[in-house]
Image (cartoon, coloured by chain):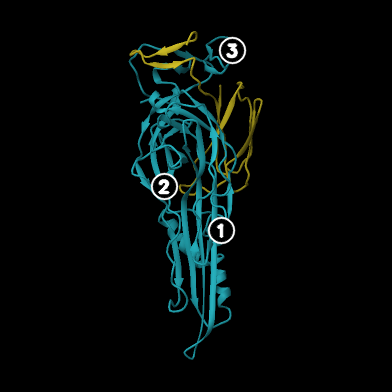
Chain colours: A cyan, B yellow
Amino acid sequence: MAHGLLVKNDDGEILIDSDFSHYHFLGKYTHTSITQVPDINEGSVANAAQGSNDYKGMQNMPARGEIYKFSVPVNGAKPPMSFIKPTSTGSSAPFTGIILTKQNGTNWEIWVFQSVVTSASPVLYCFAPLSQISNSTSTTHGLKTFDNSGTATFDSRFKPLRVVGGGNITSPTLAHTGSTGSSWTVSLGVNASNVSASFTNQSSASDLIYYCPSIASACQQYTHIEADQGWYSYTYYAWARGDLWWCFYRSCFRIASTSSFEANYGVYARGHVYEHKVDSTNLLFGIVLGAITGGAYFAAAVALAINSGAFTSAGIDGGNYLPYENSYRNNSANAFIISKASYYD
Amino acid sequence: MSYGMKIFDSSANEIFSTTDSTFTLLGVYTSNADTSTTHTNVPIMPTRIVTRIMVDQISGDDESYVHTFNLSGSTLTTTAPSATETVKTIFMVFGK
């Protein structure tokens, strides 16, 4: 820096450097709508008189989280930093994370996913560079810096971002560990241990807001196939039924205490598809197995869901009707930043 | 605070002070879908963090890969894990 302003704190951290743009408070936003990904629950029954007809719905499946959609009025290529003020904090609080960021005209569309449905709603505290803030102010007090092109980089009148903590956090690998089910009873609830990261202790957890976009996802499934054949009342019978349950999880986060930030998963989407056949040929089992492992019938079922705007999945043309199976993606460290709502309320 | 600087608004509310901490935006770098990209001239500060945001993914379809990265000196190297399923990723590098 040949000229300008450089301010450091007593830890040697740079607070203001007039060469670089700082993020400033844009506003506090509430959601415009709430949605959930509709379930995919499809199956065919040739003759329900033979074999079990139980558990053909979403019984025993873990509850879905909900999605809050926000539209943040900030026009520019740099996405806003959207801090979440969660509905609650502590060891029983829901997990919440930003799952979608998309520029839409002069706004940025932000989707916030919360692991459980609550009556209260998360709120976004958004920040943007001065060049993308169109707010005006008449106050003449404060400090304003410029870079060597004359562009404003810091202006205390617009409440610069103040940080009280931060670090890196990595979500668990899989959302569910251990057995995924028994017979027709599925067990896919999130039971992974929370991953915790600490930050500088604060006086009040409920005052904290955090920035940590969700990038990790996991998908897990459970399958069950049963068949029987024989003679009953002088009639030969044969039936087979195959089921596949799956959950697609997104990583999300919570303020666990005044010094602890936690990561885990919530159920973003879920499905249960099945095939129930009655036939006297010895090919029956193979027919059901083929359907469950990727038949055209299921591709059509999922295509219907897609047309209704429910869940878009790559590879549908290949007969795939779940995102991917028993695996996870983007499970690497992501930065988180903690601030206080009271700085901006 | 025995020394340092405080900034107040016209109502005498403290807006910023040298007892605070913050992250300054050093740069925003975009790696397009399915493409590995090396970004250069990333400013250096004593402490830096990198946040990744998946952008423009198909609404509701969040199974895509996000770019991985390595920040060393003034070079941010981003890698697409998949040639067909890596979503466009915005990297925001902050420093303090």
Residue on which disc 3 sits:
A1
Mark 1: few, some, or many residues within 10 Å (few <14, many ≥20)?
few
Helix, strand or loop at label 1? It is loop
Q: Give how far across and how far down residue A306 sits, in percent.
A: 44, 56
Residue under the point 59% across and 26% down: B48
Circle 3 marks a residue in which chain?
A: A
Label 2 resides on the chain identified as A
Alpha carbon of mark 2 to alpha carbon of mark 1: how far? 23 Å
Q: CA distance from mark 1 to mark 3?
A: 59 Å
Residue drawn where x is 49% and y is 22% of the image = A22
x then y, percent, for residue A61: 45, 58
Q: Nearer the viewer, mark 1 or mark 3?
A: 1
Residue A223 versus residue A182: which sits nearer the camera? A182
Picture quadrant where residue A282 is located: bottom right
Could you say which disc has been placed on residue A179 in the image? 1
Query: Do the residues marked 2 and 3 share a common chain?
Result: yes
Residue most extreme to the right: B72
User: Looking at numbered disc 3 in the image, what kind of residue is underneath it?
Assistant: Met
Residue at the disc numbered 2: A116
Please, is residue A343 above or below residue A336 in the view? above
